[in-house]
Amino acid sequence: MTTAKLFVLSTMVSTALLLSACGNKEETSAEKKEEKPKSEEAAASAPEENKEAEAPAEETPEEAPAEEAEPEVKDGEMLNTYIEEDTGGKAEVLYTNPDPGYEAEGNGFKVTFDGYQIVKVTDADQNTSIRFDDSPTGYVITAQVTVDNQSGKPVFYGGSANIRLQDEFTFVSSSLSNFIKDGEGLRPKGFKPGESGTMNKYEDGEKASGFVTFAMSPAEFEMMNSVKPKFVIESSASPSEDYNGASTFMEEKIFEFTYSDDQAAASEKDVKFYPDLMTVNNLADKEMIFEKTGINKTEKVGDAEITIEGVQYTNVKPTAGNEEQFGEEPLVALTVKMKVKNNSDQTIQLNNLSSKVTIDEDRGYSLNNPFAEPDDPQEAKPGEEKEKYSVFLFRADEFELYKKFDMEVGPFFGGKEYLFNEKTATFSLPR
């Protein structure tokens, strides 16, 4: 059973749940909380950031980066001059983003994409055409990346990132060697080609910069015009050489990917939707019904503080190819933005944090939908504050009947048991 089919099944089952809970003449629906399954097919095709125990694939060895100033990403100037030499073709600069704001940080380990440039390659030689899906024309995105390790320990990081296209399984992966001159790729200072244990090991206190690249075929580049592409910094950093614990050491970060001046101008006018999985995985487009920000209501549950920061109510419009995941009825999504601060001495698990919306006091209830919620953050360690999103889906025709929403968050779970006597927090949501 594919992920898409499971999403529909979740909606159907939860509809039956809420119907039985209502006890009145008006038909209603709800979402059922259940553990997110992972099929063998999905696991085989999922991006690297979802495979915690696997180390990113090693790239072709290259020489250690030279000790020199990193190149500045300037508009109009060719950032990666090696592309033409490597491809045997002609490279034309299409777009330069000198300050994208792409950054991920975890446990004192920081990765910053300082800028990137997109070039179009024409008349590439036959060997290069293979990298562009057998086309003499293709596109190369070169990013200047800085790694700063202030974690207090050596960290292994393979420079893993991807550009997400139609959905989470359609993406273009980064490379540390493709279209990159020896010595210009992102590598730690102790890198020695072919020597085990030095490949991607950044020592404590080390700061290094270099290139990573992404190669796109004409079809992939054209696809960006029909989707809202995302830039993903994968959670592929770990103190462990086998990349154990990478998913919690530095969490995945997802950003809007800009590829042209026209798109950048249009994006500035777009409504900024909360990053639930429907948005970041390009499963659906949204239309705002109602938004309330700056709510900032805080409740304490034991040694945890939960703050509701904002809500968005949106019409959900499945993107092409993803209609099956949402069933036949039009849907409305309620996405709640909150922060969880852990003042306890135990780690709080957030990837399985449940929440429930009670509708009109006694009409029924809706459980949060795990298939629509971001996988990260997975936990909040003692002293940490993490941003968390809860998502609820309703049939659009039923949503018009609802007048009042009360949201219950919790109980919280630690490593082995429930925390804070299984207490929960309740908030009245703007409607």
Image (spheres, rainbow, N blue to C red):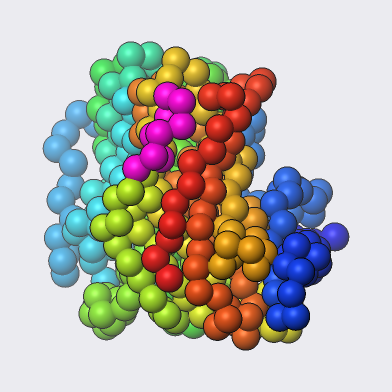
Q: Looking at the image, can residue 393 be seen?
A: yes
The percent position of residue 349, horizontal first and vertical second, equals: 56, 32
Which picture quadrant has residue 307?
A: top left
Q: Which residues are magenta?
A: 298-306
Pick the front one: 139 or 380 = 380
Which picture quadrant has residue 283?
A: bottom right
Q: Is residue 113 above or below residue 418?
A: below
The percent position of residue 36, horizontal first and vertical second, equals: 71, 49
Pick the front one: 33 or 258 = 33
Q: Quadrant of the N terminus?
A: bottom right
The percent position of residue 262, horizontal first and vertical second, equals: 27, 83
Q: Looking at the image, can residue 88 be seen?
A: no
The percent position of residue 424, horizontal first and vertical second, equals: 54, 38
Name the residue rendered at 16%, 69% in the picture: 76
Q: Is residue 216 above or below residue 387?
A: below
Name the residue rendered at 20%, 29% in the picture: 67
